[in-house]
Image (cartoon, rainbow, N blue to C red):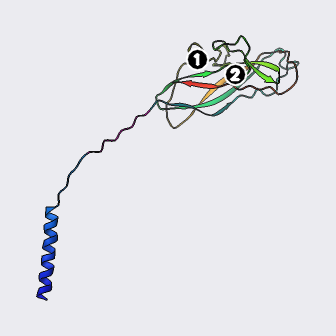
Amino acid sequence: MRTALLACAVTGALFASASAQAASSTGNLNVSATVNASCVVVGAGTMDFGNYDPAGANNATAKDVDGTFNVRCTKGTSAKIWLLEGNNKTGTSSCTTPERQMASGANRLAYFLYQNTGRTTPWGCLDASSPTAYVSASSNTSAAQTVYGRIPAGQDVAVAANYADVVTIQLNF
């Protein structure tokens, strides 16, 4: 028994000796990331004029509707929102004064997009025709942007049909 106790004591002393001799060292791990300014259009926007009646209700009264699209940017990022001229622009259309048209085959129906409810400020695709810069309040939440649309009264359309166009939304930041 004495031998067993002596063996245990020697083993314990060896472990204690090994523990006493252990050393440690420290260093640093430098961690970094760069957050870039970023903006995206979230999903597709919509604007549905519904029924346009150039012979009746819209003969003397323009057809006005509102549309929306969503934008999400890195928090604090300032962006200009441009609406390009569309797939069926007229030959004299420009970014400053876009002349957009919906199409049904070769037939056209003119319409306009505005930045304000009074429909006096066209929404174009140059800094001079862009709204005040949008500044993001949150990187995690998209913000709805309203577009004010108008089909002028009394257009002499070629045929009764469904008309459509696609306007590209561009964010410059």
- x and y percentages locating residue 143 in the rendered image: 57, 31
Residue 5: x, y in percent?
13, 83
Residue 104 picture location, percent across and down: 82, 25
For disc 2, the neighbor class at 10 Å (few under 14, some 14 to 19, many from 20) is: some
**Res. 152 image quadrant:** top right
- Residue linked to disc 2: 86
Name which residue type carries label 2: Gly
| Nearer to us in this view, 100 or 18 | 18
Find residue 4 and report its image quarter. Answer: bottom left
Residue at the location (14% across, 81% down)?
Answer: 7
Q: In the rendered structure, does residue 111 fall within the stretch colored magenta?
A: no
- Looking at the rendering, the stretch of residues picked out in magenta corresponds to 28-35
From the viewer's side, name the closer residue of 72 and 90.
Answer: 90
Q: Which residue is mark 1?
A: 130
Q: CA distance from mark 2 to mark 1?
A: 16 Å
**Is 90 placed above or below 10 here?**
above
Which quadrant would the N terminus be assigned to in this image?
A: bottom left
- What's under tag 1, amino acid-wise? Ser
For residue 79, side relative to residue 124 (left or right): left
Q: Is residue 21 left or right of residue 108?
A: left
Secondary structure under badge 1? Answer: loop
- Relative height, residue 40 to residue 155 (above, below): below
Tag 1: Cα neighbours inside 10 Å, few (<14), some, or many (≥20)? Answer: some
